[in-house]
Image (tube, rainbow, N blue to C red):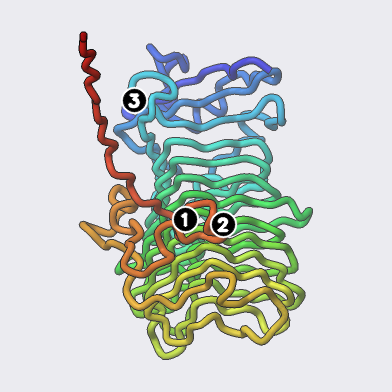
């Protein structure tokens, strides 16, 4: 497989025009899909220029207009400013009424894009593929739905009334949700920031919610891994930082997470399903949660203070500056006030901090020793 064939779209110019080159881009994304010849050998990358949103009148119909991507010939949507892959953020809007891509279609990838205004629809559905460096916001449906395996990484997901990232699979392929930021808005609040099913993984995510929003909800019988996340709620009610809602065994690993602020009457930290069995829970730190000390500790599972679970006496987060995507690693930087937060991830020998953000190392100081030779 060689590099995919490049196609360029600039939504700022007249629609249904152009040749799809960087010098003469198509003026409309839907027109590009219907016009370009699919590269069935290496696939295509459709580069969407930053600056003007592509506003859709219907969810993208890829198979009907372009063809069916394959594992060796994928379809990639990516933003750019002046050259392919330069990190520019292209914009696609659902016009308050449609999702961006809502079909279950394998091998379609999404990078460096702002996807928004999708009304009550799922904003983006991916299947056996990945998306990264996305900003997804302003809708009452679900943000990103990952089906049948794949990964979601470094995404900024906020102002959403459904689930921020929702994973599901009939074939038990795992989905990885890694290094994303989830934030409630005054208008829309998550039901859950992340929902995992079928042995999926959530790691190094930062969640900042309030009201009745869960942090991470895990369902089904899979062996979920929920590790090194920073989960914060401003007085969460009837909700939990990590919530198990399964009817069968929930064989999860829940490790090295930092949890704060589920302090409403029914707020909880780690709320395991009533019939969950053998969840491995270790190295977590919890502060200011009403029903704390790791709910349901009497059930089967490896859950003991010997495994470095802590009830903290002060906030584990620096909370310096603003709680935003750009400032997330500063705001949620771990503090050393409670022993075991910095360098306290289990096992202690690995020297990692608990939570998603790691502390900044002190700048190294170089000492120069001058050697003097004495002649006798």
The secondary element bearing badge 2 is classed as: strand
Where does label 1 land, which residue? Answer: 205
Task: Name the residue beneath numbered marker 3.
Answer: 81
Q: Distance between the residues labelled 1 and 3?
A: 28 Å
Q: Residue 202 carries which label?
A: 2
The earlier-in-sequence mark between 3 and 2 is 3
Q: Taking the image as drawn, is residue 121 in sight?
A: no
Q: Residue at x 39, y 37 (%)?
A: 54
- Is residue 54 visible in the rendered structure shown here? yes
The quadrant in which the C terminus is found is top left
Which numbered circle lies on residue 190? Answer: none
Kindly check if marks 2 and 1 are in contact, taking CB atoms under 8 A apart as contact. Answer: yes
Quadrant (top left, top right, bottom left, bottom right) of the N terminus: top right
Q: How crowded is mark 1: few (under 14 residues within 10 Å), some or many (20 or more)?
A: many
How many marks overall? Answer: 3
Q: Which of marks 1 and 3 is nearer the N terminus?
A: 3
Picture coordinates of residue 339, whole percent (x, y): 39, 67
Q: Where is residue 123 in the image (x, y as percent from the top left)?
A: 50, 52
The picture places residue 116, in percent across and down from the top left corner, at 40, 50
Kindly state the secondary structure of the residue where label 3 is placed.
loop
């Amino acid at each position: 497989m060689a590099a995919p064939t490049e196609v360029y779209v600039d939504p700022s110019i007249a629609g249904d025009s152009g040749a799809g080159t960087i010098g003469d881009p198509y003026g409309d994304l839907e027109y590009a899909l219907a016009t370009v010849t699919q590269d069935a050998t290496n696939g295509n990358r459709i580069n969407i220029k930053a600056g003007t949103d592509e506003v859709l009148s219907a969810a993208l119909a890829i198979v009907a207009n372009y063809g069916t991507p394959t594992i060796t010939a994928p379809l990639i949507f990516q933003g750019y400013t002046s050259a392919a892959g330069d990190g520019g953020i292209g914009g696609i809007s659902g016009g308050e009424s449609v999702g961006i891509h809502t079909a279950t279609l394998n091998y379609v990838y999404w990078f460096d894009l702002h996807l928004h205004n999708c009304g009550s629809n799922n904003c983006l559905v991916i299947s056996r593929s990945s998306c990264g460096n996305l900003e997804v916001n302003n809708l009452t449906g679900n943000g990103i739905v990952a089906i049948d395996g794949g990964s979601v990484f470094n995404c900024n997901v906020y102002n959403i009334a459904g689930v921020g990232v929702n994973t599901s699979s009939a074939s038990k392929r795992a989905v990885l949700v890694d290094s994303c930021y989830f934030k409630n808005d005054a208008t829309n609040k998550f039901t859950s920031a992340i929902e995992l099913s079928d042995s999926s993984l959530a790691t190094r995510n930062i969640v900042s919610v309030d009201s009745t929003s869960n942090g991470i909800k895990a369902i089904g019988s899979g062996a979920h891994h929920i590790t090194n996340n920073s989960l914060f709620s401003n007085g969460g009610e009837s909700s939990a930082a990590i919530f198990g809602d399964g009817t069968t065994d929930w064989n999860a690993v829940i490790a090295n997470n930092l949890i704060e602020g589920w302090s409403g009457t029914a707020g909880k930290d780690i709320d395991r399903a009533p019939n969950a069995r053998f969840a491995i829970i270790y190295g977590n730190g919890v502060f200011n949660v009403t029903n704390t000390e790791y709910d349901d500790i009497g059930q089967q599972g490896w859950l003991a203070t010997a495994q470095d679970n802590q009830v903290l006496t002060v906030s584990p987060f620096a909370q310096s500056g603003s709680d935003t995507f750009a400032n997330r690693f500063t705001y949620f930087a771990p503090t050393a006030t409670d022993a075991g937060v910095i360098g306290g991830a289990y096992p202690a020998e690995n020297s990692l901090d608990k939570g998603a953000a790691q502390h900044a190392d002190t700048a190294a100081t170089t000492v120069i020793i001058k050697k003097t030779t004495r002649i006798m």
